[in-house]
Amino acid sequence: MTKPSFVYVTYIATTPEKLWQALVDTDVMRQYWFGSAGCARVNVSDWKPGSKWEHQRVDETRTVDVVGRVVENNPPHRLVITWARPTEAEDESKHSRVTFDVELQPDGFVRLIVTHAGLEHDPKMLESISGGWPKVLSNLKTLLETGRAVLRAAPAK
């Protein structure tokens, strides 16, 4: 039986270094990463292998929606993290794994491959990320190519 995975491939007119910065720098991240309620999100870590990371809302709550550990960090080529709900942080059997592969292409574009694997135990997470990753990564591509993200934070009420 094959394990359910989500794979997203895109080509971006940028450099590997700029793409890498967008993956790990919260100032860049808050420009393109939004949740379902329109609230900006950031991934907070020192990005060293073995370190924790948190997917936090950028609002007054600073709610943590996802947690994990950095498995591999090879700038600007590869980042691997585990991914879990905060309530399942201590149970590694419930963690999935996200790999970001950044590859400079001969035509000058950068290929970004995001693989979210290990979702066989969690069909709800597979459903959620299958809708979320395309929005986030499309917004990332637009931001890097135009300087402006398409999706933006919801206006304050």
Image (cartoon, rainbow, N blue to C red):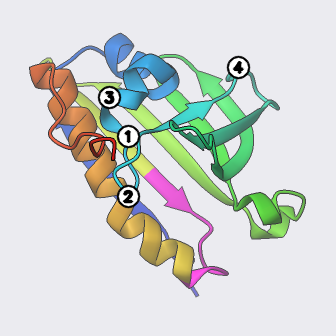
Q: Along the polypeptide, which appears first: circle 4 or circle 1?
A: 1
Find residue 111 and report its image quarter.
top left
User: Which amino acid lies under the numbered mark 2 shown in the image of this protein?
Assistant: Ala
Give the mark toward the camera: 4 or 3: 3
Q: Is residue 156 above or below residue 95?
A: above
Mark 3, other Cα within 10 Å: few <14 / some 14–19 / many ≥20: many
**SS for callout 3:** helix
Going by the image, does 65 lie left or right of 113?
right
Decide which of 137, 28 is in the foreground and name it.
28
In this figure, which residue is indicated by the disc labeled 4?
46
Identify the residue at horizontal 37%, vertical 60% (top origin): 36
> Mark 3 — residue?
31
From mark 2 to mark 4, how far is it between C-alphas? 27 Å
Q: Is residue 89 magenta?
A: no
Mark 1 falls on what kind of element?
Answer: loop
Across and down, in percent, residue 7 comes to 38, 59
Q: Earlier in the sequence, mark 2 or mark 4?
A: 2
Residue plotted at (84% across, 61% down): 92
Give the alpha-carbon distance from disc 4 to disc 1, as whole Å.
19 Å
Q: Position of residue 101 (x, y in %)?
A: 44, 36
Q: Residue furthest right?
A: 90
Is label 4 or label 1 in front? 1
Q: Is residue 138 left or right of residue 118?
A: left
Q: Which residues are magenta?
A: 115-123
Looking at the image, which is closer to me, 21 or 152? 152
Amino acid type indicated by mark 4 = Asp
Q: Which residue is mark 1?
A: 33
Residue that carries the numbered disc 2 in the rendered image? 37
Q: Amino acid at mark 3?
A: Gln
Numbered disc in front, either 2 or 1: 2
3 is higher (above) or lower (below) than 20: below
Q: Are marks 1 and 3 in contact (CB under 8 Å)?
A: yes
